[in-house]
Amino acid sequence: MKITFFIDGNEITLDVEPTRRLLDVIREELNITGVKEGCGQGECGACSVFLDGKLVNSCMVPMIKVQGSSVITIQGFSKTERYKVLEQAFIDAGAVQCGFCTPGMILASEALLTNVANPNDVDIRKGISGNLCRCTGYNMIIDAIKLAKKRGRDLW
Ligand code: FES
Ligand code: FES
């Protein structure tokens, strides 16, 4: 089935099975490997992307649902000023260890900071509750998000 959609701002048409996972198309057809596969079951957030502005787990999205939509991956988001602030804050707060969860954490942080004006710790924990990290114990990620908000006050 021919499916046309936007990926990181570029329009693309692919002939794919309608039940194929968006995650597989992103990684295998488009070679956007910043989007990771962890659990493959909608539970870890490593495969996060924005689909029409909403944070989703791309391992749970069949291609039929992507027809006519706009998908933003971590690689598209990395061109923005907000990404740069988040990236530096994650580095400075020690929130990146193995790095496997980081692309999803960054996108979850972007969603949180866009949707909640002045998030407190509870808001932040809730905002990243769909993203698993095996390394940091989460506190450094929470610190990174607070730091990004402080530094990028005008951006969100
Ligand atoms: S790989 Fe998609 S949520 Fe874990
Ligand atoms: S930094 Fe390793 S899983 Fe989060």
Image (cartoon, rainbow, N blue to C red):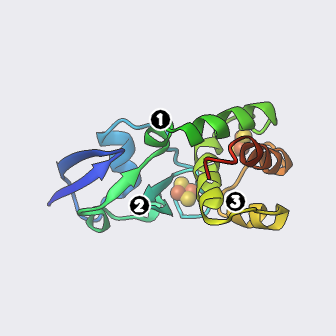
Query: x and y percent of residue 7 in the render?
Result: 32, 47
Relative horizontal placement of residue 6, taking residue 21 as reference (left or right): left
Point out the tag, 1 or 3, that comes first from the N-terminus: 1
Question: Does 151 sit above or below residue 13?
Answer: above
Task: Please name the residue that numbered disc 2 is placed on.
Answer: 51
Query: x and y percent of residue 93 in the render?
Result: 81, 36
Work out whether residue 136 can be spotted. Answer: yes
Task: Please name the residue that numbered disc 3 is placed on.
Answer: 128
Relative horizontal placement of residue 154, taking residue 95 as reference (left or right): left
Point out the tag, 1 or 2, that comes first from the N-terminus: 2
**Measured Cα–Cα span from mark 1 to mark 3:** 22 Å
Residue located 36% across and 46% down the image: 26
Query: x and y percent of residue 78 in the render?
Result: 51, 37
Task: Please name the residue that numbered disc 1 is placed on.
Answer: 79
Work out whether residue 96 can be spotted. Answer: no
Front: mark 1 or 3 = 1
Dot 1: what SS? loop
